[in-house]
Amino acid sequence: MGRYRWVVVSLLFFATTINYLDRQVIGLLKDNLAKDFSWSEKDYSRIVMAFSTAYAIALMLFGRLIDKIGTRLGYAISIIIWSVAAMFHALATGTIGFGIARTALGLGEAGNFPAAIKAVAEWFPKKDRALATGIFNSGTNVAAIIGPPLIALIFSNYGWQEAFVWTGSLGFIWLIFWWWLYEVPSRQKKITKEEFEYIHSDQDEDIKDRSQKPGWSGLFRLRQTWAIIFGKFLTDPVWWFYLFWIPSYFNSTYHLNLTSSAIHVSTVYIVASFGSILGGYLSGWLIRRGIPIYKARKYSMFIFACCVVPIFFVRYTNGIWPAVWLISMAAAAHQAWSATIYTVAGDMFPKKILSSVIGIGGMAGSAGGILFPFLIGIILDHFKLLGALGTGYNIIFGICAGAYLLAWGIMQLLYKPEISVVNVEATLPHPPH
């Protein structure tokens, strides 16, 4: 049996790494750019909000577009838009220019996950999808590990404009390999007959020949869609909290600076990378041992939700390294959860509408990522005025600890094993002839 499907995963991994590398450049250069352009914190927050809002809206649009035009072309359009937008930052001369560039970047980057998840569904049987998703999803952490030294090297030698240009150009290099190597299995001449049969070994054959595609609005009438929406809305914001506040937490709590806390922040992302891959492996391992797909995903996600709970005890640690390991375990559990919830969507929905579902779920997660920071700011500002900033972080860690178990419980109410992809499609309204 051939292994060409792992070439596809490699392409998805590098695309996801580039995706997160491009989006974090402005954050890494924030202090220098703020000095050059006289940004206030409010100016910078508006630039960030421009990206977040565009990303949330475009997730739904790109999800539907990719279902219509296919993964190969849809992914190509996505990376062209975000690579051009990333390079366009170098031409910005003020807050408005950066805001426009970030908006375009958010629009383009929104296509990454809908396209990648659909590609995994096209190239892997269900028992392998969580592992494949975990592998490419680990690119988000790799970008966070290699990004700081890479951007610092480019900035120190060539300036901030080149940092945007060089990282943005990586997308065009990737595009060459994507267009050369990627095609759906039925049209890919590089795979063997045995690998093709393995890829389709557990597909639902009775939905293959449906000629009509269900209406996009009909997805919101399905409880399965709402399972993905709540699963993403309640947990994605926790990851953004790790990205944007954990460095500040280390610095304020343990009296560190950006340089001295770098090893601790890097440790969180390194551990999270392993969590993404091992978490993706777990449900597939359970399926291979005879556990039904629904129960394998259910048990795996419960384990991941429980692994986040110990973050509540960060408040009781006496040194930074115990706190680092507790946060690292929670971050790894999130990445495992994220890989599995994407796979759950593939279990419940036909491939031809999967990108639409991923886009809807991603939009919900982004909406939570926009709202949660407001709550974090209110909590931290309140307790900072009282001289008890640590108490504010303790409350936030408590929210993070319980978010996944709450999401898991809601998903169990909505995600029923007796609802197959065939039944999903049967309940969707179809457009008229």
Image (cartoon, rainbow, N blue to C red):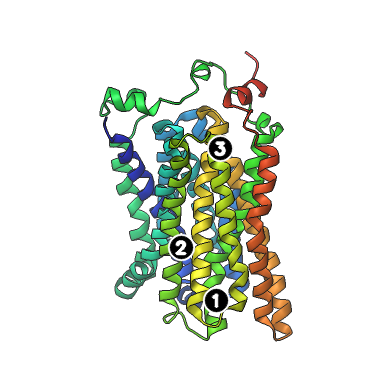
Q: Amino acid at mark 2?
A: Gln
- Residue 365: % across, % down: 61, 51
Foreground tag (2 vs 3):
3
The reply to whether residue 348 is visible in this rendering is yes
Q: Which residue, as the protein is rendered here, is positioned at the far top?
A: 433
Residue 311, above or below 228 = below
- Residue 192: % across, % down: 26, 26
- Residues marked 2 and 3 touching at CB (< 8 Å): no
Q: Amino acid at mark 3?
A: Ala
105 sits to left or right of 225? left
Closer to the chain start, of discs 2 and 1, is 2
The reply to whether residue 38 is visible in this rendering is no
Closer to the chain start, of discs 2 and 3, is 2
Quarter of the image for the N terminus: give it.
Answer: top left
- Quarter-wise, where is residue 49 in the image? bottom right
- What residue is drawn where x is 74% and y is 77%? 382
- Distance from Cα at disc 2 to Cα at disc 1: 16 Å
What residue is pinned by disc 2? 24
Query: Residue 248 shows which numbered tag?
Result: 1
- Residue 132: % across, % down: 40, 43
Q: Nearer the viewer, residue 94 or 15?
A: 15
Foreground tag (2 vs 1):
1
Foreground tag (3 vs 1):
3
